Image (tube, rainbow, N blue to C red):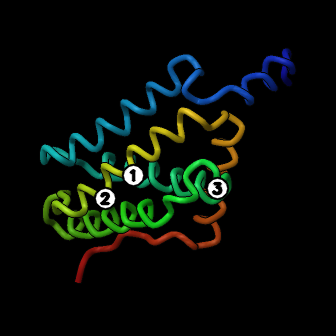
């Protein structure tokens, strides 16, 4: 039961960046995971954080083309970089990017940062629902050990 329906509706119209702590906490979490990978301290949690970050980036770009739709190839390149790095990591090697992979991920992180400036709370909720639906329908690529 929502006691203040108007506040709920208004919060859905705010951009994520303007919601107290939400936007900054999300950015810190994403960049912390990227830093851990770059400094060779990454865990599976860090990799999962980056996967979620770029799945949401893709979902926003697909659902709201004015918010990154023209960057789909660059977003896909970052997802491929994380996928390949993740495969190497679960195979017993380090969770580390190659130079080209790191370049792709940094660009996509900038795209995601800009999306967070523009996207509303309601739109990011729709993007999260879209990602969950893709996972449910088995449209996502699971990371498995490299052969």
Q: CA distance from mark 1 to mark 3?
A: 15 Å
Q: Quadrant of the N terminus?
A: top right
Question: In percent of the image, x 53 and y 51: which residue is there?
Answer: 56
Tell me, yes or no, whether the two marked residues, 1 and 3, touch with CB atoms within 8 Å. Answer: no
Q: CA distance from mark 2 to mark 1?
A: 6 Å
Q: Are marks 2 and 1 in contact (CB under 8 Å)?
A: yes
Q: Secondary structure at mark 1?
A: helix
Most distant residue in the bottom direction: 147
Instruction: Name the foreground residue: 105 vs 70.
Output: 70
The secondary structure type at the circle numbered 3 is helix
Q: Quadrant of residue 74?
A: bottom left
The vertical placement of 82 against 41, above or below, is below
| Res 65 label | 3
What residue lies at 59% left-to-right and 30% top-to-bottom?
A: 16
| Location of residue 144 in the rendering, given as x and y in whole percent from the top left corner | 33, 73
Q: Is residue 3 left or right of residue 144?
A: right
Residue labelled with disc 2: 104
Q: Which residue is mark 1?
A: 108
Rendered location of residue 105, percent (x, y):
32, 54
Q: CA distance from mark 2 to mark 3?
A: 20 Å
């Amino acid at each position: 039961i929502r006691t203040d329906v108007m506040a709920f509706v208004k919060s859905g119209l705010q951009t994520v960046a303007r919601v107290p702590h939400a936007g900054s906490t999300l950015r810190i979490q994403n960049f912390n995971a990227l830093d851990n990978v770059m400094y060779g301290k990454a865990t599976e949690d860090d990799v999962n954080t980056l996967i979620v970050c770029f799945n949401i980036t893709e979902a926003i770009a697909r659902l709201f083309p004015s918010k990154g739709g023209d960057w789909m190839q660059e977003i896909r390149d970052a997802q491929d970089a994380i996928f390949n790095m993740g495969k190497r990591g679960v195979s017993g090697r380090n969770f580390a990017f190659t130079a080209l992979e790191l370049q792709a991920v940094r660009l996509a992180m900038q795209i995601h940062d800009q999306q967070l400036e523009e996207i509303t709370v309601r739109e990011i909720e729709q993007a999260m629902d879209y990602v969950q639906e893709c996972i449910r329908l088995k449209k996502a690529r699971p990371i498995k050990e490299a052969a």
